Amino acid sequence: MRTKDQLETAIRQGGPAVLIVNVRSRRGRRHFDQAVRLLDQAGLTFARVFPVADPERLPEIFGEALDLAPDLIVVGGGDGTVKEAVGHLAERDVALGLLPLGTTNNFARGLELPVKLSRAVAVLRDGKIADVDVGRVHRSSDPQDKAGEVFANMISLGLSVEVAGHVPHGLKRVLGRGAYALTAARLMPSHPPFKATVHLGGRTHDLTTHQLNIANGSHHSGRPIAADAGPDDRLLTVYRLGDEARLKLAAATLRHVLTGHRRSLREDEFINTGDEVFIRTDPPLPVDVDGEIRGETPVRVTLVPNALRVIVPRGFEDN
């Protein structure tokens, strides 16, 4: 592995780069041509450009891109596209550049990347390389699942999983993040609470809730989890929103939206661990991994520190 400075120098000297854009994402289809033009104006050139209309082809596309031995892969899309990118680039000597073209862009926001396309391109041109953490989720009932599946931002259980599966695509296209809030309001009255057992740091926590999250990143639904959360803080942050009462879920969600940027991980809702969490629920629940359903509980979640090289603004605090 080269040092960050060595890799950055190779990229600035015109080392091979690849552009992959999910043109099925909310903004990818509308902004693909603009993105290509802005990148060209910024002096960024690419050995290959992949506009991907079928997200199921993303694993194949990333394989083709890596065969070119690039120094940089720039990815445009939402959180699902970013998850696919991180799964291929974690623990590799390749930098990831991001064009946030999704609805919530949680991982990009945690890296302090601007959502406006022209400013995101400017970061690719002028930014620096940081090493940030990733997570791995392991199906604890499958003894063969030792490596686990890499994720960038968050694992979720409960109401948000149901919301993600029911939010109308047309509404999401029109309202963006607001579509999730409206869908949650519709589904909340009938959503049942669940019991969860969380093992971490030698302690066991039993709780009842409608929503449980395990975060590597610092944003949820496009808003900060807490002022001191970050994608390179060497912590998996486990937290619930409310308890079995639906009104408390609503209040906790509103507090997250309005005051997340002022909250601290030292508050009672948050449980932190350096590297490993085990989650069991009653009943077993689907597990949302960066926006995609990937099996169900029980699961074990581990942290992989400094596993991903990514281009961030110069002011980003790289730990």
Image (tube, rainbow, N blue to C red):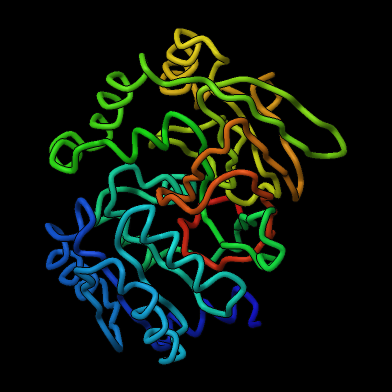
Q: Is residue 19 above or below residue 230?
A: below
Q: Spot the residue most to the bottom.
A: 68
Pick the quarter of the image with the C terminus: bottom right
Q: Spot the residue most to the right.
A: 202
Q: How many labels sit on residues?
A: 0
The quadrant in which residue 166 appears is top left
Nearer-the-camera pick, 247 or 280: 280
Q: Is residue 253 above or below residue 275?
A: above
Q: Which residue: 25% across, 81% down?
A: 49
The quadrant in which residue 308 appears is bottom right
- Residue 50 appears left or right of 296: left
| Residue 16 image position (x, y, % from top left) | 39, 88
Nearer-the-camera pick, 204 or 314: 204
Q: Which residue: 63% across, 66% down?
A: 307
- Residue 255 appears left or right of 229: left
Pick the quarter of the image with the N terminus: bottom right
Q: Which residue: 60% across, 37% down?
A: 229
| Residue 55 image position (x, y, % from top left) | 28, 66
Q: Is residue 149 above or below residue 169?
A: below
Q: Which residue: 58% across, 42% down?
A: 215
Nearer-the-camera pick, 41 or 216: 216
Q: Is residue 271 above or below residue 113?
A: above
| Residue 231 image position (x, y, % from top left) | 58, 49
| Residue 51 image position (x, y, % from top left) | 21, 73
